Amino acid sequence: MSNRTASIVALVLGLAVAAVLAASVMIAMHTDAPTRASRAAIHAAAAARIDARHTEAAAHDRAYDAAFDPAMVRDRVEWQWQGDAKTLDLTIVNATDGADLTRAARDCARWGHKQTGLRTQCYAFASSEAYDYKNITGDLDAATRKTTAIVNLCWRAMATIEASEETPSTMVDMRDAPQTWEAQQCPESWTGGDA
């Protein structure tokens, strides 16, 4: 066999091996790719998890006859940052349909301030799901090994009373800050409350 024939045979064999390897890779990729049935199963499982989360959160929701009731309070934290005034943070959930959450936050802040005399902040949530979403206060406390301010990103209204005052000096309604709400990935349905 001449050198030329040997080279041609080697080239053909090399091409054949490359073709077999390419076919094997294509088969493996096709086999590993989710089928339509498995994609549907994945979507169904994700939807089921979301439904379960909604159901669990709704089980903790309560409606109230009053704008604020101490039973709404979910968290109560006293914290201080360096030389700043000691602050009482409160979170409340009022899932009443059509509730005035701005008034609820204001009444909550007054209630906390009256109890302690501290600078008081009250964050009002429209549902348990909004309250639970991105609630990272516990993780921060564990990381810093000391009590930190409440960090829970999808509140609807917040009222602040300074220690020396009797009425809220700051009121924030997240509906007035839609870009912030969107940046925090808070669904619009969680704003709830009065129009």
Image (spheres, rainbow, N blue to C red):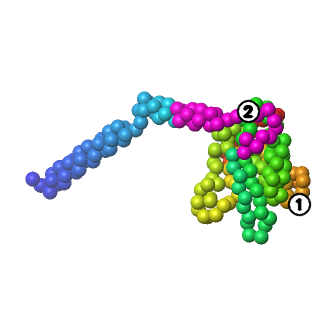
Residue placed at 59% from the left, 32% from the top?
Answer: 55
Query: Which segment is the magenta one?
Result: 47-73
Type of residue at label 2?
Ala
Q: Is residue 172 visible?
A: no
- Relative to 192, is 86 above or below? below
Report which quarter residue 148 is drawn in. Answer: bottom right
Task: Give the image location of residue 159, x and y in percent.
Answer: 82, 49
Q: Is residue 132 visible?
A: yes
* Mark 2 surroundings: few (<14), some (14-19) or many (≥20) residues within 10 A: few
Type of residue at label 1?
Ser
- Relative to 155, is 78 above or below? below
- Relative to 60, is 9 above or below? below
Separation of residues labelled 2 and 1 (CA atoms): 33 Å
Mark carried by residue 164: 1
Q: Is residue 136 magenta?
A: no
Residue placed at 68% from the left, 54% from the top?
Answer: 151
Count the marks: 2
Question: Relative to the observer, which residue lies in front, 127 or 45?
Answer: 127
Q: Please report contact status of discs 2 and 1: CB closer than 8 Å, yes or no.
A: no
Task: Give the image location of residue 133, x and y in percent.
Answer: 64, 45
Relative to residue 106, is residue 51 drawn left or right? left
Q: Which residue is mark 2?
A: 63
Q: Is residue 55 magenta?
A: yes
Task: Give the image location of residue 24, x and y in percent.
Answer: 29, 42
Residue placed at 76% from the left, 31% from the top?
Answer: 97
Q: Residue furthest front?
A: 115
Report which quarter residue 67 is drawn in. Answer: top right
